[in-house]
Image (cartoon, helix red, strand yellow):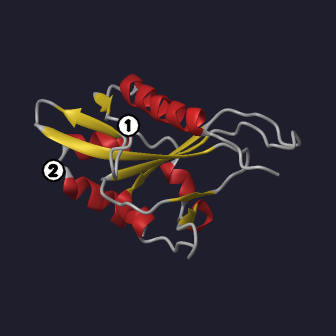
Amino acid sequence: MSRLDTRLESEGAEFLVLGQLLIHRIPAYKTYTNMPGYDLVATNPERNVAVRIQVKSRWGTGAKDFPIQNFDCEFVVAVFLNRGSKDGKKEVADPDYYVLPVSIVSALPRTANWKKVSMRNVVDLDQYREAWHLISDFLNTSGKAAGEAAALASS
């Protein structure tokens, strides 16, 4: 089976995350295409603090892993789009969002060839499902300390 071109869906995932940030009252914007290390920036203008967010998306329903090589951000938002399967056997469902401090993702084991991490290796994964508050907490407290506290809480 040929490889599926998911560039449009990947770009859409970035906009989905941007929309989620905005409806959760987190000011954010999309960076220029192919900015190394991050795709979105969330800000707290009153505190003059910003957080870089890398969006990783997977097209297929039931996907649980994604490739990542660059950790030059504070958060990774994994978006599982759940668009079915190429063979049509899996159903389309709503997207799943996981808001992960980069320290959690960078500590996960990665495959040798594609540098994939598996969400199965994240301890207490459900605590990160739609955890937009981690980003707002980061922006509203001392920034880096909030991200480290979130990482310690999951250990």
> Of all residues shown, which one is farthest toward the front?
2
Which mark is drawn over residue 33? 1
Asked which quadrant contains residue 155, the reply is bottom left
Locate residue 133, reporting x and y percent: 37, 40
* Labelled pair 1, 2 in contact (Cβ < 8 Å): no
Instruction: Give the number of the mark in front: 1 or 2.
Output: 1
List the residue tagged with mark 2: 142
43 to 100, vertically: above or below: above
Q: Secondary structure at mark 2?
A: loop
Locate residue 124, reporting x and y percent: 54, 61
Q: What is the C-alpha distance between the residues marked 1 and 2?
A: 29 Å
Residue type pointed to by label 1: Thr
Q: Secondary structure at mark 1?
A: loop
Out of 124 and 86, give the one closest to the viewer. Answer: 86
- Earlier-in-chain disc, 1 versus 2: 1
The residue at 29%/56% (across/down) is 147
The residue at 41%/67% (across/down) is 106
Q: Is residue 29 rendered to the left or right of residue 43?
A: right
